[in-house]
Amino acid sequence: MKNYIYHLKDFYPPFGWSNPLWGNSESSERPIIVNCASCVNTSAQHTCRNRVGRKDFSLIYVISGKLCDKSAERGITLTAGDVIIIPPKTTFSFDCTGENIYFLCVHFTGSEALKRVTDYMLPIYPSYKKTTVDNQIKIKFQRLFDGFSTDDSYRDNDLSSLLESLLVEIARSITPKGMEKRSILKSLNYIKEAFSKPITVNELAKIENMCATSYNLCFKQLMGTTPTQYIINMRIDASKELLEFSDLPISEISMLCGYSDFNFFARAFKKATGMTPRQYRKHAANH
């Protein structure tokens, strides 16, 4: 595949390294909406970054080369076969290294976007999933790219359907054989509803009728992180949203997001974002 950005308004525009915001929008008009997609296949050394965070979800699938996360506290490196979902309003910076970097990407939004990511147990940044390069996934991406070239009243629905098919194919490739029978969806939904309250692994394991050891193993294999870290990530994401879009005191936000100890919240927040809650609020207000 050649370097392209596939965009709804301007079909096949020339690829530009300097514009990370093609098709950048959020919407709840339909369950799944494809904003744009891209193919990067080059030997040029460069940095793939977004300093402000897109409004939609970004799915990245690496074919060859390396994407090295420049964030010191995360320090992950994506290689051939790795897949990751970058959620809305998340900043990132990857160095593209190796003899040739080749990755595929699609940006999507919609009222059911987060539910799809959760239901298909796709890894959310900074977690990622290691798998092998799957030709079926490449084919699904190509069909999605081809969908942008049509120009009729069915195109948007067609793109949504093609994305659903791609997400299912990726979910199949990253789910260990037999693990799909041991779904953790009930406990994921529980975490989503009760993340602001104290939650133990034993409690989550009981929901899925597992012992804590089996649940921990199952959760990490399916989600790419531990239950504890997953809950922390959800709390931090919720606090970021409240800091950005509300005028609530930071101490109250700490309580609402499951941290009764404000100092503990401040340390956890800085570890995850590199900023204090106050700094994050100020930064968000200036952007």
Image: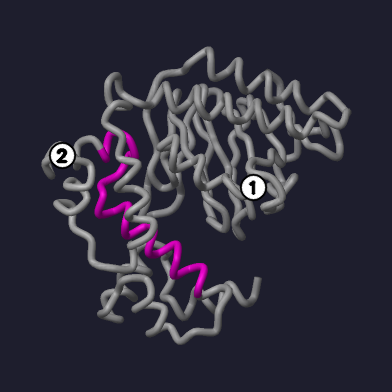
Left or right position of 249 against 212: right
- Residue 115 image offset from top left, x and y in percent: 50, 45
Name the kind of residue labelled 2 in the image: Met
Give neighbour class at mark 1: few <14, some 14-19, many 20+ (Cα, 10 Å). Answer: many
Does residue 187 belong to the magenta stretch?
no
Where is residue 178? Give x, y as percent.
27, 21
Residue 200, above or below 108: below
Q: In which quarter of the image is residue 231?
A: bottom left
Question: Which residue in the protein does label 1 denote?
Answer: 110
Which secondary structure, mark 1? loop
Residue occupying the point 38% across, 33% down: 129
Q: Position of residue 54 (x, y in %)?
A: 63, 53
Q: Residue at x 86, y 32 (%)?
A: 153
**Residue drawn at point x = 64 percent, y = 55 percent:** 55
Q: Is residue 83 in view from this perspective? A: yes
Instruction: Report x, y in % for residue 4.
Output: 74, 29
Q: What element carries label 2?
A: loop
Q: On the rendered structure, is 76 left or right of 49? A: left
**Residue at the image point whose x is 50% and y is 73% from the top:** 242
Name which residue type carries label 1. Answer: Gly
Q: Magenta span: helix, strand or loop, mainly?
A: helix
Marks 1/2: CA–CA distance:
33 Å
Mark drawn on residue 210: 2
The answer to whether one can see residue 102 in this image is no
> Along the line of sight, which residue is nearer the eye, 285 or 261?
261
Q: Is residue 33 left or right of residue 83?
A: right
The C terminus - image quarter? bottom right
Identify the magenta region. 219-242
Judge by depth and name the residue closer to the eye, 53 or 141: 141
